Image: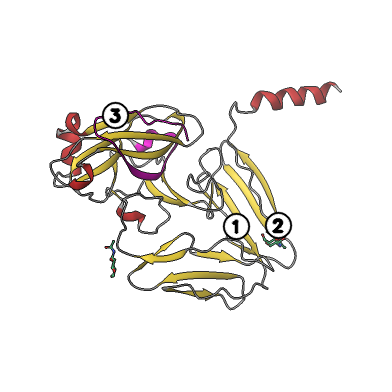
Amino acid sequence: MVPALKLFLIYIAIQPIASCDLDIKLPNGQVTKSSSWFLGDNIKFVCNRGFSLQGKLWHLGTGNIGKRYCAKAGCTDIKKPDNGAIFTATDGLKAEIECDAGFVLRGNSVTYCNGTKWIIKLGTCQMANHTGDYSCDFEREDQCGWIASKAIPQPWKRISAAADFRKDKCLHKDHTFQSDVEGHFIRLQSQVHASRTSHFISPIYPRSLTLGHSLWFQFQLFMFGTEVRDLTISVKPSSMAVEDMWTSFGNMCTKLTVSGDQGPNWRSQSIFIDEMKSDFQVVFTFTNPSSLHGDIGIDDVKFIKTEKQVKLRINVAQ
Ligand SMILES: *[C@@H]1O[C@H](CO)[C@@H](O)[C@H](O)[C@H]1NC(C)=O
Ligand SMILES: *[C@@H]1O[C@H](CO)[C@@H](O)[C@H](O)[C@H]1NC(C)=O
């Protein structure tokens, strides 16, 4: 009994306090994993007899773990979508959607058959020009016009919950669908080589949005980890270069700086936008991606109009 008890105590001692370890599942297959601090993860994906693995057999080392699927033919053909086409692999294991010119994919581009049903819901094709309310859930492939400042490697990435596992980090669920198989969001990846200030920039919003009422810009933020510091949200005139804003006009443009661990959940944040004299943009800035030990995610950005003067503080968790 004594050795068993000892093992049990050690086991408790090495459990992280708030464990975000992902349970890596492979329906119709098996996952074997081991990890060590010097080699990272060592994960093997094997499908049951009759299924074939979509993705690599092994995942080695640290970093993102692409999701694998065990596929088997037998699904019915997917109906041709509006404004796009479906390409089904000749072996019947995989199908892909492609949108016609002038249309943009919203949702997932690839799915696999599990023998009877397609596993991932495929997206739809939407008109390429942006629509009305300037909100964005990052389901659209074009990110509704949001872009990152140039950097190699690029720390801001659009993540698909259906395509990406992540170990040791809590952020794996999309906010829009609250799902770890459906949805997309933006993640700031910690990167050893990326030491430069990095911006994530909205499309240009018209000045008229800020007139005649009070305007709030709301976003969902996931910020978790031991060393997550200083994500700054700014608003600038569209004619001002992002670099100039950051180096010379910080006082004027900075609306909010979020610093430190905000817990392993998506939280709603918002900034007030004053009446602008010109068209404008919203900018997220992170100063040093190499120092990030944790996760930062952004999802579901939108504008909220309230009656003028009523500057109520909207800051409801979730
Ligand atoms: C395939 O997916 C469907 C729908 O999710 C499920 O009902 C079925 O059990 C799955 N089949 C296998 C072999 O996993
Ligand atoms: C997008 O383009 C289509 C035709 O190309 C047009 O009918 C529609 O009004 C446009 N929508 C917006 C929001 O500009």
Residue 273 numbered tag: none
- Residue under circle 2? 29
Q: Is residue 196 visible?
A: no
Kindly indicate whether the residue at mark 3 contacts the one at mark 2 (C-beta within 8 angstroms): no
Residue at the image point whose x is 67% and y is 65% from the top: 114
**Disc 3 residue type?**
Lys
How many labels sit on residues?
3
- Residue under circle 3? 311
Residue at the image point whose x is 50% and y is 40% from the top: 171
Q: Around disc 2, counting alpha carbons within 10 Å, would you say few (fewer than 14), some (14 to 19), or many (20 or more)?
A: some
In this rendering, position of residue 82 left or right of residue 144? right
In this rendering, position of residue 233 left or right of residue 12? left
The image position of residue 231, as x and y in percent, is: 34, 33
Residue at mark 1: C-beta within 8 A of ligand 1: no
**Disc 2 residue type?**
Gly
Could you say which is closer to the camera, residue 287 or residue 280? 280
Query: Which span is picked out in magenta?
Result: 289-318
Mark closer to the chain start, 3 or 1: 1
**Disc 1 residue type?**
Arg
- Residue under circle 1? 68
